[in-house]
Image (cartoon, grey):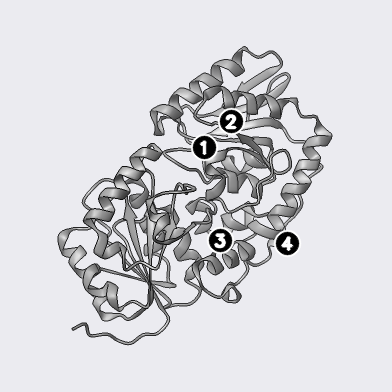
Amino acid sequence: MITTHHQPGVIGLFADSVGAGLATLVKVLADSPGNVVLFARKEIGRRLMDHEAIYPFLEKLESIELRDYPDSAEFQFDTLYVTWAHSLCFTAEDRAVLKRILPHAKRKVLLYDGNFGTYRDMLKQQLRNLISEFDLLRQMDAICYMTVYPKRDLFSVVKRRFPLSVGPNIDLLYDSGKLLEFYAEWNPNAPRQFAISCSGNKATSVWRTELVDHLEQGLRKSPGLTLVEDESRTGPGKVIVWSVNGRRLNLAAYVDILSQSDFVLCIPGTSWTHRPFESLVRGAIPIIDENNLRIHDVPWVDGENCLIVRQPAKKESWAVAIQRALALRQPEIFKMRERVRALREEWLLPAAFSARLRSKLGFSPAMVQPQPALVSQPIL
């Protein structure tokens, strides 16, 4: 029999590791101290860069409680979120704790990381999960997809599904000064320094490395283009920032490049990327693949607020999208940026983004507090 402290309104997160999606949920849901309790360990049984980088942010957050797994038996949860990354990676002891507390939560939601490689790989893994973890899965009221969000999978037959609304990078989300700078206003009709920018680590997957190398070779052969590594360099013709050779841009330089780019090439890392959201906020038009459209919960319209890469598994599809961007004239770009600005106001500013995500998660959007002074920032 579980003894509880009978704390109504408590939201619990039972996590095998801490990633960007989980940190976004915590930020949106933790509207008052004691509202959210996160059960996770600082040291986990495997090396995960996301966990090691993001855990310290949540450790310093005063609006949540950070506890160890056995402490979860002390609480009565209105909603309990459980992470599920590839397979359930808790120890046998931790899983025993989870199985004890799960039936007592009023609402249970699986936070599902569906990054399994191919669609067929995902179906195979889900079938194994349904066989081996059926008792746990059947108790879930819904599944929140933290990365890829397929149109159909085995879970769609038995559970309500919805994608996480991907917000900005965690370094922005948890630093109020950087967040205000990130959301500062900009002029949609001001010319920008760079035609396209592309940044990040190309070695996150073999496919990404091959794609980046293929595109770079094609761009370097194209007349009238200059490729530079950062915002401090320039050259003749249309300038493209191409910073995908292993050197990560610092956050200030990254935001500045977004603010000075007409288009941003949003190549996924292992399965997804924050970059489309961040590009829209800074007024840069995303070049985004059709597989990632569903993750970002944005009303995408090709040629209006983005350029969509169809059949993104083909390298040439990305090359075609880049040529579309380079062929657009300045008045057409200004018109697209006006639409991006309207989208930013309605969907992406912190209060609107948080309210929509809270509503999707089943909580009142009215509890969201808007970020201060966003509208008073200067127009760049």
Q: Is residue 272 left or right of residue 130?
A: right
Task: Write down the residue under mark 3.
Answer: 176
Badge 4: residue crowd in 10 Å (few <14, some 14–19, many ≥20): few
Asked which secondary structure carries label 1, the reply is loop
Q: Indicate whether 133 appears above or below 116.
A: below
Q: Indicate whether 100 appears above or below 153.
A: below
Task: Write down the residue under mark 4.
Answer: 375
Task: Write down the residue under mark 1.
Answer: 249
> Which picture quadrant has residue 318?
top right
> x%, y% of residue 274?
52, 46
Task: Write down the residue under mark 2.
Answer: 230
Q: Is residue 117 left or right of residue 380?
A: left
Q: Kindly identify the residue that appears in the image at 22 percent across and 69 percent down.
A: 99
Answer yes or no: do the residues labelled 2 and 1 have beta carbons within 8 Å? Answer: yes
Asked which secondary structure carries label 2, the reply is loop
Please, what is the three-letter code of the amino acid marked with disc 1? Leu
C-alpha separation, residue under disc 3 versus residue under disc 1: 20 Å
